[in-house]
Every structure is written in C-alpha cells, then in structure tokens.
Image: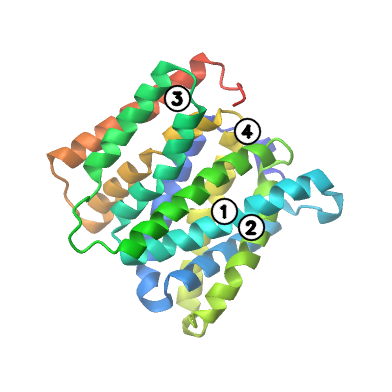
Amino acid sequence: MKFSERWSIPPVLAVLLAIISVQGGAAIAKGLFPILGPTTTATLRIGLSAIILLAAYRPDFRKISKVQWQAVIPYGLTLGAMNIIFYMAIKRVPLGLGVALEFVGPLLLAIYGSRRAIDYFWVLLAAGGIALISPWSANGVDLLGVLLALTAGGFWAAYIVLGGRISKLMPDGQAVAVGMVFATMLVLPFGISSGGFPKVTPQLFLAGAALALLSSAIPFTLEMSALRRIPMRTFSILMSMEPAAAAICGIIFLKEHLNFFEYTAIVMIIIASAGSAMSAKSSKLHATD
C-alpha cells in the first residue's frame, strides 16, 4: 500500500505538517514522562511506530538491495539515537531550550551547505529568532541536559543527510518503515533496562500509540517525502520553525503566554522559513546538494 503514490503533498507543506504533528506528540510525551520515563516513552513510541509503518507499507525485505541496506541501516540507527537522546535531554532542560539546542545541528548543516548570500541571511534570521526564544540564563540549567540536546542535534543533522540519501533509493514509506525497525533495535535495550514497561497500562499503551502516530509515523514519512524533492539546506531552515511551533503549542495547550521578544522570535523564524521556501522554489527545488 503506497500512500505516497495516492497523495501528493507539496514538500514545504509536508514539512509544516510534520512540525505540527511532532509538537502534538510532544504534548502527549510530556504527560508520559512522569510515569514511564524518557527512555521507555521513546522505546514505546518508536516500537509502535515501526509496527504501524510495517503494517501500512509492507516492505518486502527480500527485495532490498545491498546498496539500500547500507543506506537504511545507518538511517534507522540515527533515527533511534536522535529520539532517545532528545527525550533524555528534555527531562533535564525545558522543552523550548531543548528544541533550540537540538536545532544547532541542522542549522550548522544549513550553513555548511549554502552557496548563496541570501541563504546565509535566512539562516542568520532563523538563528536570531532561536536566540530570542531560548531561555539562555544559566541559572538552574542542567549541563548534562544541554550536552544531550546538542548531541541530539548532531544526530538530527546526520538524519537529514542520511534521509536525503535513502529517499533517493527507496520509496518514502518503505524507507521509514524499515528504518524504524533498526531504530527499535537500538532503543529497546535502554527501554527495557529503565524498568518502565511494567507500568504500561491499556490507557498508557493507547497514549503511546497516539504518540507513535504523531511523533514518528506521520512526521517522518512526511519528511522523507519532502527530502526527496527539496535541497537538504532548505529542509534544515524550514525545520527552524520547531521552536516557534513549540511556543505556540504552549500557548494553546499549556496557557503559556509569551513576551514581546518571544513573539518577535516567532515572526523572525517564520519569515526565515518562508524566505527559504521561496528561495528553493526559485532554484527549482530539485537541485541536489
């Protein structure tokens, strides 16, 4: 069953929908942390995502070539590492700070891949927005949490590179489904050793299934679709909307009101994302980096 063949979502819209989906999943994950812990939550999310995607896309493992295996295995392992490390980070630091620190990885990747002055401008504008939206005060900030978030950002940059590679070798849904299997293999020992699985009730299992859909299955499939059709640096800049989306979800779901500088940051990041999208359109979107 090939959803990507039935639905043709514009790449920029696919990235935006992925961001919204991830932030909805983050709200669910935040509720599971006090009961299950970050590693069990990450394992439940990734494991159920693998099951959902395997059922939806039914990849034929016998037909996967050696070249495809060599691409999809590191992609899946990177996917698993990125998620479990980020969950461990946001247990120690605020979500907004964790998201901003994690974005350092894709931001550096975007700068590295840029060839035009206008692309540097969009990156700098997005970076300025992140600087405004982030709680940079050192009071009470957990150093290990900061390091974990930065490490997750490094894996996020690797995920963008590897995702761009595998998206050219395998159909979108099948690539994510097979990658999720290897992500599950990586995180499962950590989830089991944390001792959170005995606490999983039917209600928590359903919450985990919703988390799997919103935080993994849906957004990663959308991102794979986008990565196949836009340059990697453009994808990186578009993802800078993550901190802004987190702040907006905070207003809607957590009643967290923002100050002038935080609203300004949201506007800066949205402008940078829109600008990068228009820049990609003018360069015909299909350029390779």
Task: Identify the mark nearer the N-term, 3 or 1.
Answer: 1
Which comes sooner in the sequence, label 2 or label 4? Answer: 2
What whole-number distance in Å separates the C-alpha atoms at marks 3 and 4? 15 Å
Q: Which residue is mark 3?
A: 277
Looking at the image, is 233 positioned above or below residue 184?
A: above
Disc 3 residue type? Ala
Q: Crowding near pointer 3: few (<14 within 10 Å), some, many (20+)?
A: many
Spatial separation of the CA atoms under disc 1 and disc 2: 9 Å
Placement of the C terminus among the 4 image quadrants: top right
Q: Which residue is mark 1?
A: 217
- Within 10 Å of disc 1 (Cα), the crowding (few <14, some 14-19, many 20+) is many
Q: Position of residue 135 (x, y in %)?
A: 22, 51
Give the distance between the C-alpha atoms of the residues marked 3 and 2, in whole angstroms: 28 Å
Secondary structure state at the residue bearing disc 1 = helix
Which coloring applies here? rainbow
In the figure, is residue 59 to the left or right of 189? right
The disc, 1 or 4, on the residue closer to the chain's N-terminal end is: 1
Disc 1/disc 4 C-alpha distance (Å): 17 Å
User: For the residues carrying marks 1 and 2, which lies nearer the camera in this image?
Assistant: 2
